[in-house]
Amino acid sequence: MEKDLETSTTPATGQVAEAWARIRGRLREEVGEVEYRSWLRQMTLSAIEGEEAVILLPTRFLRDWVRGHYGDRLRSLWAAEPLGVRRVDIRVAPELRGGNQEAEPALADGTLRDGAPKAGPSGAAPLTAPGARPQQAALALAEPLSSPPRNEARAESKHDWAAPLDPRFTFDSFVVGKPNEFAHACARRVAEKPASPGFNPLFLYGGVGLGKTHLMHSIAWAISFNGQRNVAYMSAEKFMYRFIAALRSQSTMEFKESLRSVDVLMIDDLQFLIGKDNTQEEFFHTFNALVDAGKQIVVSADKSPSDLSGLEDRLRTRLGCGMVADIHATTYELRISILQAKAQGGSQGGAEVEVPPRVLEFLAHKITSNVRELEGALNRLIAHANLFGRPITLESAQEVLHDILRAHDRRVTIEEIQRKVAEHYNIRLTDMSSARRARNVARPRQVAMYLAKQLTSRSLPEIGRRFGNRDHTTVMHAVSRVAELMQSDGAFAEDVELLRRMLET
């Protein structure tokens, strides 16, 4: 074991344990149960080294998140204890994965508060404490709220008609940015307090590959964790097939009772029910029965309820009466964050591979429309590097991903952008290149320049030439001005995102 993971002995063992228990308790009260279980529960106190407390976490991702979001608070809480601790060092200990770091606080001398031996020099507590229930039950209780319990069958559903949950799709692995922060916050709220007023039903909508299914699985894992609620997740297509099978076998009553017995019903890709009148009718009655009984419903689709033409009006209005959350198209910053988290996360079955920042930036610029495709491209690069034992470079990325990059290369031209923006703002196409400076012309022109910079690979001078031979500094000003307005004006930001979506699709 490396020196930094060793557990040192201190004379004030009892004091250390009590201080650590108080600190964890205060953090739990401050951030709430969901946040605590998601990010902080897996912390293990390894040692007190002079004026420094050493805390271990099982992954780099968790370490970086806790260090960035809770590091200062941990330092201040330790400083408030009478142990002389002034610094907190948060480190990675991969061997802690899957263990229970909270059955009892780990002490600096390698024992638990009740005197039972600690699991090992890493500082992780054993999976079960004396007098606890059998190991399997303890394992399920030991997992953080945002991670799937090890007994997956228990967590997923009691019903064989429900779809399995993907253990990769948890709140831990969901990267939050401006385009999805509202939907993420709503999902967290439902996971923490199902069927709370204003959030039932929760309706998530957005384009393909933006994270709707990921959020739904995250909610299901989080709610299932405590084992007190029965969660059923399925696609709208599977809902229809199960309903048809029940009709054919004359077991519709059993199907209805089975659906109405759940505490949380989650239906993915609801747009599949468009035109399926009988299935819509059944879903409507199931919806009413569950909501009236105080049960939670979570639904996803590619459009908002009001835009799902083909659904019955009564169903559309019921779907829109709760919380409707849009997941916008990704920004460059969010794509970079997703790629960085993914690059840190795994090795695709081989040795860990370093992905240079230049390659991540290249992918984030080139693959803009679909997070699934973005992650798939990175997986492909890592797999290729592992299989052939070659480092990832910008040149190798272009070679390995040539087919994906070619499909994305075309995409939008400056002329297309000018035409679409002019139509949207009801100005003449010639105004894009004119010298007119009236606000109703200048602002759309700035938006078009901004989108040209975001959606094409053209240089600033070239973009300026396409807008009436304007200088590249004019384009720079337009890009920064639009970005500022998008930060301060939500309606304007939605307008620009709408134009971006229309151009990308």
Image (cartoon, rainbow, N blue to C red):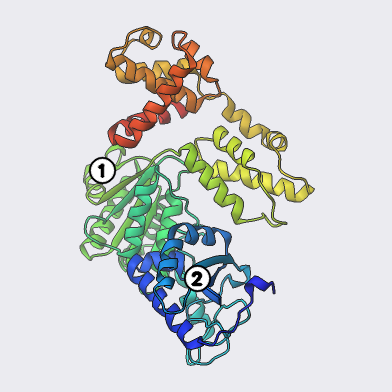
Q: Looking at numbered disc 1 in the image, what kind of residue is underneath it?
A: Glu
Please say whether residue 225 is visible from this viewpoint: yes
Tell us which disc is closer to us: 1 or 2.
2
Camera-side residue: 479 or 363?
479
Give x and y (percent) for residue 489: 29, 34
Image quadrant containing the N terminus: bottom right
How many labels sit on residues?
2
Camera-side residue: 70 or 244?
70
- Residue highlighted by disc 2: 42
Residue 56 position (above or below residue 271): below
**3D distance between C-alphas at marks 1 and 2:** 47 Å
Is residue 326 left or right of 83 when viewed as pictured?
left
Specify few, some or many for label 1: CA neighbours under 10 Å numbering under 14, 14-19, or 20 or more. some
- The residue under the point 79% across, 47% down is 388
Tell me the quarter of the picture where residue 228 sits: bottom left
- The residue under the point 47% across, 13% down is 471
Q: Are marks 1 and 2 in contact (CB under 8 Å)?
A: no
Residue 489 position (above or below residue 419): below
Give x and y (percent) for residue 125: 54, 81
- Residue 312: which disc? 1
Give x and y (percent) for residue 451: 44, 25
